[in-house]
Amino acid sequence: MARYPTNGLTLAQANTIAHETLTKGRSLKLQPLTVVVLDAGGQMKAMQREDGCSLLRLEIAQGKAYGCLALGVGGHELFRRSTAMAGFMNALSDLTAAKGYGAVPVPGGVLVTDSHGVVLGAVGVSGDVSAQDEVCALAGIAAAGLAAETGEQK
């Protein structure tokens, strides 16, 4: 039997994350959400966009996840860096935009790790306020039996 690399997350894990992220959003009665799950190579593994999402939610969610992967940190740390190092973050935004992804340095972007801290991918959620987007991402990641790195200082 042939074995194929997963480059981090499996499709089953990505689908669980996407589904459970939206389930959490519905249970909290949030605005319509878009969730993007990227594998460790930054490739889209799963995406779900609820009915009623406003324009650019896909791009924002993808930018939240891609920004996390680009620097290897969660959305909270990206946000801190965007205020402390605006020039660097502008350059990051330009570089990621040139790749066709963009980087959105706010909460709602979360790294997905295994139990040893190995980065398997990232999740980006957009549609409600960033803090609520992040709550939903964390619920989806936990439902898949994986760990999350938000970049929040402890």
Image: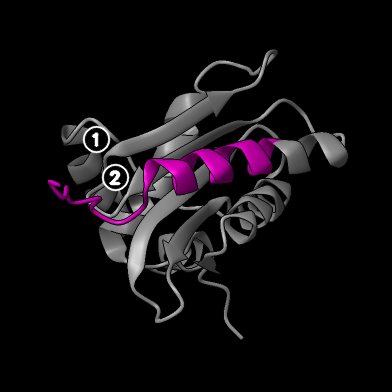
Q: Determine whether 97 is above or below 154 in the image.
A: above
Task: Name the residue tied to disc 1.
Answer: 97
Q: Position of residue 31 (x, y in %)?
A: 77, 29
Whether tag 1 and tag 2 are in contact, CB under 8 A, the answer is yes
Residue name at image x 68 percent, y 13 percent: 51
Residue at image position (64%, 18%) is 53
Q: Could you tell me how far apart the alpha carbons at marks 1 and 2 are, in whole angstroms?
A: 6 Å
Viewer can see residue 62: yes
> Within the magenta stretch, is there residue 3?
yes
Where residue 88 sits, quadrant-wise, is: bottom left
Residue 8 position (above or below residue 63): below
| Label at residue 46 | none
Q: Pick whichever, 8 or 138, lies toward us.
A: 8
Label 2 is placed on what type of residue?
A: Ser
Residue 82, how many percent across, how many down? 42, 60
Q: Position of residue 17 (x, y in %)?
A: 56, 46
Q: Residue at (50%, 59%) from the top-left corner?
A: 75
Quadrant of the image containing the C terminus:
bottom right
Residue 149 at least partly seen: no
Q: Secondary structure at mark 2?
A: helix
Q: What range of the chain is rendered magenta?
A: 1-22
Residue 72, horizontal then vertical, whole percent: 32, 66
Given the current orientation, which residue lies at the most extreme bottom position? 154
Viewer-side residue, 144 vs 103: 144
Left-right relation of 140 to 98: right
**In the image, which disc is placed on residue 93?**
2
Instruction: Name the one closer to the observer, 128 or 148.
Output: 148
At label 2, counting other C-alpha atoms closer than 10 Å, the crowd grade (few under 14, some 14-19, many 20 or more) is some
